Amino acid sequence: MCLLAAMVNGAASHAVEMDDLHRESIFHPASAIIPAAFAAAERGHVSGVALIEALIAGYEVGIRVAVAAGPNHYKYWHTTATCGTFGAGAAAARVLNLNEEQTAWALGSAGTQAAGLWEFLVENAMSKQLHPGKAAMNGLLAALLADRGFIGPLGILEGEKGFFRATSQDFDEEKCIANLGQEFLSEENSLKHYASCGHTHSAIEATLKAAEGKAFGPEEIKAISVSTYWAALDLLKRVEPKTPYMAKFNLPFCVATAVRYGRVDLRAFTEGRLEDLEIRALMKKVSLHVDPELDRNYPKKWPSKVEIVTRDGRRLVGVCDYAKGDPRNPLSEDEVVQKFKDLTEGIIPYEAMKDIIDRVMNLESLKDVTEIFGEWRQRCPSSRSSTS
């Protein structure tokens, strides 16, 4: 059942588009890696320190594979699904204390299962949550099989018929091991502040900077110009906001929401907001452009520039290189805790919420990770995870 736990938690963690983001690798590590590591950790009743070690291993492997795969990989392949499978396999292998050979087998079996194409976004389909769920499950499965002696291909990344050559035209396999053990790419990980696709965040923040804390109605606005990098528009320009979820991938909707309400949080993506006539009117005023200078900085930066032209002739300009939540513009500890509370409100009782926060913030002191949910797990049958 640990495999099903990994899949369900992986899918759920990606559902509201507020999971983490590693900018350069164009990758959401947590939704694939943490569910695999946690399912394996609960199954083995390991310590909090062991779980932390597994997560670091999983993040480094997943991120390094994604960086090495190159931006071209992302044109067709959802990195969280593909490279997330490697990260999940590495994290689970660490929890299981696999030796060097077994870990290589696990990564080989993980890589041969790596999949996830962007076509779902073009067709407004529902596959995105399936991607990290399957990545978590498949990575964990690969590690469990390796633990039983199941041999995986050792050249799964760099081989003539391996992952890199099959999925990218600009891969650089050396990036997998560059400064390994000295430079930790996971330190560049971001925590999302806005409840939408990461490619919308710098535009949202640039909009908020331009507006300077004010909210505007459509009658006050003449035009809104959004300049950004090519990859953002290539991925998002054909997405129609037909559902609250797809609205998270529609730049005009996100920018119009920022203009009208001065924030883009969980409440921004509802059926009511989709039907909001003022939002619809503002969306029609939004024009999207690729800026060559901004594009040159991608993916080290995901920058945007927004210019709002008001009816009375003012030009309000905002520029954002690093959106809120990036390591260069980080969330505070209080903001991270509040984000958890907002996401779990109505799901976890308040008292249990406080206990979970305390245990997670002191994870290194736990002797058994199954203690994280404490008595709440016993009181609430629906919250019990079967990871045996």
Image (cartoon, grey):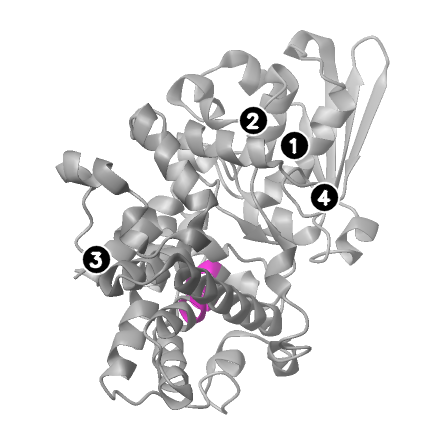
Q: Which amino acid does label 1 sit on?
A: Ile
In the displayed structure, would residue 95 be above or below residue 165? above
Q: Report the disc number at residue 4.
A: 3
Q: Residue 162's x, y, as percent?
A: 46, 85
Q: Check contact, mark 1 vs mark 2: CB within 8 A.
A: yes
In which quarter of the view is residue 108 placed?
bottom left
- Taking the magenta stretch, the answer to whether it contains residue 52 is no
Q: How far apart are marks 3 and 4 (CA)?
A: 36 Å
Please tell me which residue is depicted at 64% across the width and 79% down the height of the picture: 172
- Say which amino acid is labelled 3: Leu
Is disc 2 in contact with disc 3, using a CB cutoff of under 8 Å? Answer: no
- Measured in 3D between alpha carbons, the distance from the residue under mark 2 to the one under mark 3, in whole angstroms, is 33 Å
What residue does disc 2 label? 264
Packing grade of label 2 (10 A; few <14, some 14-19, many >=20) is: many
Report the amino acid beneath label 4. Tyr
Which residue is at the front of the view, 229 or 265?
265
Residue range highlighted in magenta: 80-87
Residue under the point 38% across and 22% down: 271
Real-space CA distance between mark 2 and mark 4, rounded to the nearest whole angstrom: 16 Å
Q: Position of residue 369 (x, y in %)?
A: 32, 54
Does label 4 or label 1 sit earlier along the sequence?
1
| Amino acid type for the residue under numbered disc 2 | Val
Q: Is residue 313 visible?
A: yes
For marks 4 and 1, give the CA distance. Answer: 11 Å
> For the point 83% across and 51% down, which residue is it?
293
Q: Mark 3 and mark 4 in contact? Answer it, CB < 8 Å.
A: no
Nearer the observer, disc 2 or disc 3? 3
Label 3 environment density (alpha carbons within 10 Å; few <14, some 14–19, many ≥20): some
- Which element carries disc 1, helix, strand or loop? helix
Please give the label number shown on residue 322: 4
Query: Which residue corresponds to mark 1?
Result: 204
